[in-house]
Amino acid sequence: MCIQEDDSEFSATPRLVAALRNHHIFEAVAEDPLRIERSVRPAWQVFIREETRIRLASWAFTMDSCFAIMFNSCPLITSSEMQTGFPCREDVFEAESEAAFDTLVSCRNPRFHRTPAQTFKDILLDDCNPEAYIDVDATGLGIVICALQSQTMIARHWSLLPATQSIILRTADRWEQLWHSLTDRDGSEEPPLKGFTKNNEELCSFVRMLVRAGNIEVPGCRYTRIQPTDDIGHLNQFLKRFGAV
């Protein structure tokens, strides 16, 4: 390991997460500005403030999930903490004026009105109907797959994969059903995938790799040892070993 070279990465992330919790970033929005009647809708600035908080929470959760993968560690943020809404459509958030914002909001639903925590909890259930979540966009599905990824890493580190793998794989199947419904939708008005959303399907594949690997330490594959590492080569070694199975 090379923690001696620079362990600031390991100490900075917990401090960041603690600061976000201290400022209630992951908590529910008191009243979503996008759901208030037009006659009493608060100023555009209120929407910007609340949407920025939602996006900060989503970014932190996604990055925490990815750091858990990179460093073979447990995530710091749990899916149940994500009580904010999903981020709204990009065009609504990037509106250049209040008038443009009002026009975009009046055209069609700008946000899926369930929290990431509730959505992830629902798709884990035996009687879940994935069709109920067909309106979750690519960004939202990215948050959901990161939640599954984080949950799988937790199960792995607590030796719970054998007991939970069927639920994890069933949830991965449901997520893929929603993803393909979104990306294959005829006449979809969704913008092309960009940024981190391009990797959503690969994250789902990684969840399946973790289940395949189980909790057995494989000689010559350091990542299968349930112990944190800061050597990205260990992750690459794991991907080569289990990605082709």
Image (spheres, rainbow, N blue to C red):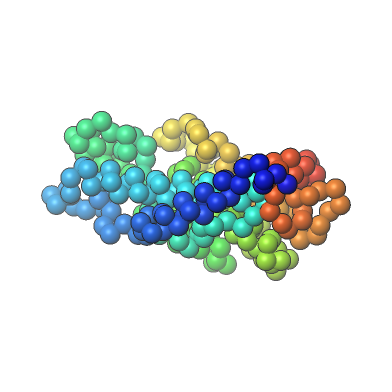
**Which residue sits furthest front?**
4
Residue shown at the point (42%, 50%) measured from the top left: 57
Determine whether 1 is above or below 225 in the image. above
Among the 4 quarters of the image, the one containing residue 4: top right
Of the 4 image quadrants, the one containing the C terminus is top right
Q: How many marks?
A: 0
Residue shown at the point (39%, 45%) measured from the top left: 55
Residue 141: x %, y % from top left: 50, 47
Residue shown at the point (49%, 32%) measured from the top left: 194
Residue 236: x %, y % from top left: 73, 40
Question: Which residue is more in the foreground, 120 or 28?
Answer: 28
Determine whether 1 is above or below 93 in the image. below
Question: Which residue is more in the foreground, 123 or 65?
Answer: 65
Residue 214: x %, y % from top left: 75, 58
* Residue 177 as seen in the image, left or right of residue 38: right
**Which residue sits furthest left?**
39
Residue 28: x %, y % from top left: 35, 59
Q: Is residue 140 visible?
A: no
Q: Is residue 41 visible?
A: yes
* Residue 42 as seen in the image, left or right of residue 164: left
Question: Which residue is more in the foreground, 178 or 102?
Answer: 102
* Residue 132 as seen in the image, left or right of residue 230: left
Among the 4 quarters of the image, the one containing residue 190: top left
Residue shown at the point (48%, 63%) measured from the top left: 80
Question: Which residue is more in the foreground, 129 or 199?
Answer: 199
